[in-house]
């Protein structure tokens, strides 16, 4: 599996990265995890605009899903439209929420471009991938993902506070993309996001091969986030996500 970080900025696009979007490729199949603000532009540095075979959304906060609106325009009205409908695995409210964001009536909503498949905890076969979704710890319906292509395996936290489910999803994966939105300090809100140190604790419990800290919020000092992670008890490689980074796990 090849993993490309299309966007890794937390909560809103930063000067160096769009919001959350990860491209997974295996056996010629291309799947996106999240399509957050600004990511549709950066995606075109890596693959053609129409070369997406499936999209999976962890949750319906804007920084994880909003570029589906622009992508609907591209696939519905592009020069060779109509393009094949793309399956979108997402929380059940996605058709209504994204139609409202677009300014479209619920019928037809965005369904000229996308075939929405409601997520629930469990496993889905998507092209060559097996995606396992588990509910994580965030104020809205939010999933973490484990994705395997049979040879290699990754986990993606989405947005979450401390979560046993995230440890389960990430158990033994080659690469863990784990959010690290917070810098440690007093009065951090519970059940919302992780610090770098907490990301490392989850990676250690799960026994992952490599930890990539992501959902990096631009107002934080990222060196501090990384430093906290290196003191979190995980003894494998740790690095900060970087827009455009590629991990070829094969
Ligand atoms: Zn977020
Ligand atoms: Zn969120």
Image (tube, helix red, strand yellow):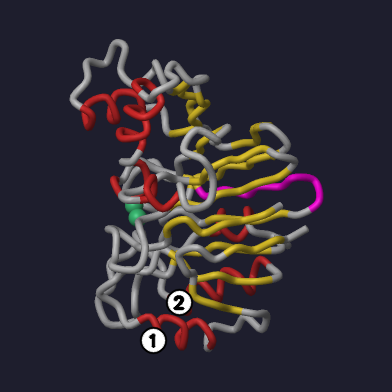
Which is the main secondary structure of the residues drawn in magenta? Answer: strand
Which is nearer the eye, 148 or 68?
A: 68
The residue that appears at 58% across and 78% down in the rendered structure is 238
Callout in the foreground (1, 2): 1
Q: Is residue 105 a member of the stretch shown in magenta? A: no
Q: Secondary structure at mark 1?
A: helix
**At which x and y percent is residue 231?**
52, 88
Farthest residue in the top direction? Answer: 107
Q: Is residue 198 above or below residue 174?
A: below
Q: Which residue is mark 1?
A: 224
State the residue position of label 2. Answer: 196
Instruction: Tell me which residue sits at (50%, 38%) in the image.
Output: 56
In the image, 118 versus 205, the foreground residue is: 118
Tell me whether the residue at label 1 lies in contact with that at label 2, contact meaning CB atoms closer than 8 angstroms: yes
Residue 134 point in image, percent of width and height? 55, 45
User: From which residue to which does the magenta span run?
Assistant: 144-151
Q: Quadrant of residue 206?
A: bottom right
Q: Is residue 106 above or below residue 156?
A: above
Note whether residue 46 is visible.
Answer: yes
The local secondary structure at tag 2 comes to helix
- The earlier-in-sequence mark between 1 and 2 is 2
- Give coordinates of residue 85: x percent, y percent: 49, 20
Q: State the residue lying farthest toward the front.
A: 79
Residue 16 lies, in percent from the top left, at: 34, 68
Residue beneath the point at 64% across and 41% down? 131
* Furthest residue in direction left, as rendered: 103
Please determine whether, in this image, residue 33 is positioned above or below residue 200: above
Q: Quadrant of residue 121?
A: top right
């Amino acid at each position: 599996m090849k993993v490309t970080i299309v966007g890794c900025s937390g909560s809103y696009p930063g000067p160096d990265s769009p919001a959350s979007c990860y491209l997974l490729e295996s056996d010629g199949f291309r799947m996106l995890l999240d399509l957050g603000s600004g990511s549709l532009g950066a995606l075109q540095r890596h693959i053609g605009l129409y070369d997406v075979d499936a999209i999976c959304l962890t949750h319906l906060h804007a920084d994880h899903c909003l570029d589906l609106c622009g992508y609907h325009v591209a696939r519905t009205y592009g020069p060779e439209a109509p393009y094949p409908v793309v399956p979108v695995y997402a929380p059940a409210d996605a058709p209504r929420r994204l139609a409202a964001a677009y300014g479209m009536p619920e019928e037809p909503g965005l369904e000229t471009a996308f075939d929405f498949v409601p997520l629930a905890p469990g496993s889905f076969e998507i092209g060559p991938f097996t995606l396992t979704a588990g509910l994580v710890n965030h104020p809205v319906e939010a999933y973490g993902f484990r994705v395997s292509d049979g040879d290699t395996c990754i986990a993606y936290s989405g947005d979450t506070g401390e979560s046993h489910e995230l440890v389960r999803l990430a158990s033994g994966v080659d690469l863990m993309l784990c959010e690290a939105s917070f810098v440690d300090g007093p009065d951090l809100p519970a059940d919302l996001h992780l610090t770098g140190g907490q990301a490392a604790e989850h990676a250690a419990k799960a026994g992952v091969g490599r930890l990539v800290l992501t959902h990096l919020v631009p107002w934080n000092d990222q060196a501090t986030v990384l430093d906290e992670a290196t003191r979190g008890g995980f003894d494998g490689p740790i690095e900060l996500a970087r827009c455009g980074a590629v991990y070829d796990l094969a």
